[in-house]
Amino acid sequence: MSDVILQTRGLTKHYGGVHALEGADFTLMKGEHVAIMGDNGAGKSTFVRQITGVEQPTRGEIHFDGARVAFKGPLDAREAGIEAVFQTLALADHLDVPDNLFLGRERTKWNWLGPFRRLDYRAMHADTIAALEKTGVKIPSIRNTIQNMSGGQRQCVAIARTATFHSKLTIMDEPTAALGVQETAQVENIIRTLKSQGEPLILISHNMRQVMDLCDRIVVFRRGRICANLRAADVTGEEVVAYITGALTQPKYAVDGVL
């Protein structure tokens, strides 16, 4: 069985005359944590939007868990096993924690009654508690609505949602950008927990210390292209920054010239 969980070949996205992503060849192994870095507009988020079905690529291939895929939307990607935490969080402010964790995937009971089934609030409540314990997320009351929570609590709820369902791949887009020191440490502990459980992760981050501490590899995007694929243990932050800014332009690859 292949150890590759995600692979893209020539992944490209054009918005009219704007080439936001061009020829991205990328490979992620099972259990591997990879950081995607680059300046604003480098193509990082565009790349993630293609592999999560938020947008459709102009051309190129996406292979996930051994099969070629063409997700028509985020729900297709989620059903395939890709859980994503975007900067926008995609939480429903007027709902509480269990309702947000199970939004679109509600637990039901009395399924033998056909369409006349009821939501199983007790099961969703118990599973929410289990997910929060698994990730170490502390919420004063899971009955609080999202609109009454701090930014850090909202971020942790979004991350806990990924832990509720046994995903094959977790993607986090700047998960700690708006968090304080204590809340950042909590999110980083969640990432370490995913690593210890062998769950692969793609982390988009501008935080060099975080990337060096948490990730196996660093893939650098510049002007819509992948310009470097680096083992985190083999490079310095200064070298990564040099690729991000264009001071280093010679492509550098981590493993046998394969991204």
Image (spheres, grey):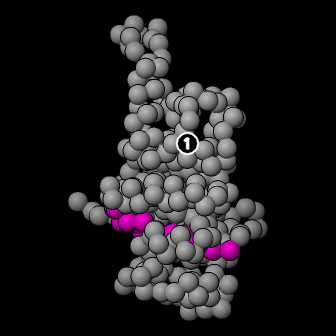
The residue range painted magenta reads 23-39
Measured along the vertical axis of the image, is residue 39 above or below residue 121? below
Q: Can residue 172 be found in the magenta stretch?
A: no
Picture residue at 41% right of the left edge, 73% below the top: 216
| Quadrant that contains the N terminus | bottom left
**How far from the left and from the top, in percent, is residue 110?**
38, 11
At label 1, counting other C-alpha atoms closer than 10 Å, the crowd grade (few under 14, some 14-19, many 20 or more) is many
**How far from the left and from the top, in percent, is residue 223?**
68, 76
Picture residue at 59% right of the left edge, 88% below the top: 238
What amino acid type is highlighted by mark number 1? Val
Q: Which residue is mark 1?
A: 157
Measured along the vertical axis of the image, is residue 37 above or below residue 5? below
Describe the element under mark 1 as helix, strand or loop: helix
Q: Residue furthest right?
A: 17
Q: Can residue 32 be found in the magenta stretch?
A: yes
Measured along the vertical axis of the image, is residue 155 above or below residue 111? below
Is 43 positioned to the left or the right of 214 in the image?
A: right
Q: Is residue 99 visible?
A: yes
Picture residue at 41% right of the left edge, 60% below the top: 192
Q: Quadrant of residue 259?
A: bottom left
> Closest to the observer: 138 or 228?
138
Q: Quadrant of residue 24?
A: bottom right
**How far from the left and from the top, in percent, is residue 124?**
45, 26
Is 186 positioned to the left or the right of 91 in the image?
A: left
Main secondary structure found in the magenta portion = strand
Q: Is residue 55 visible?
A: no
> Closest to the observer: 195 or 58?
195
**How far from the left and from the top, in percent, is residue 16?**
75, 62
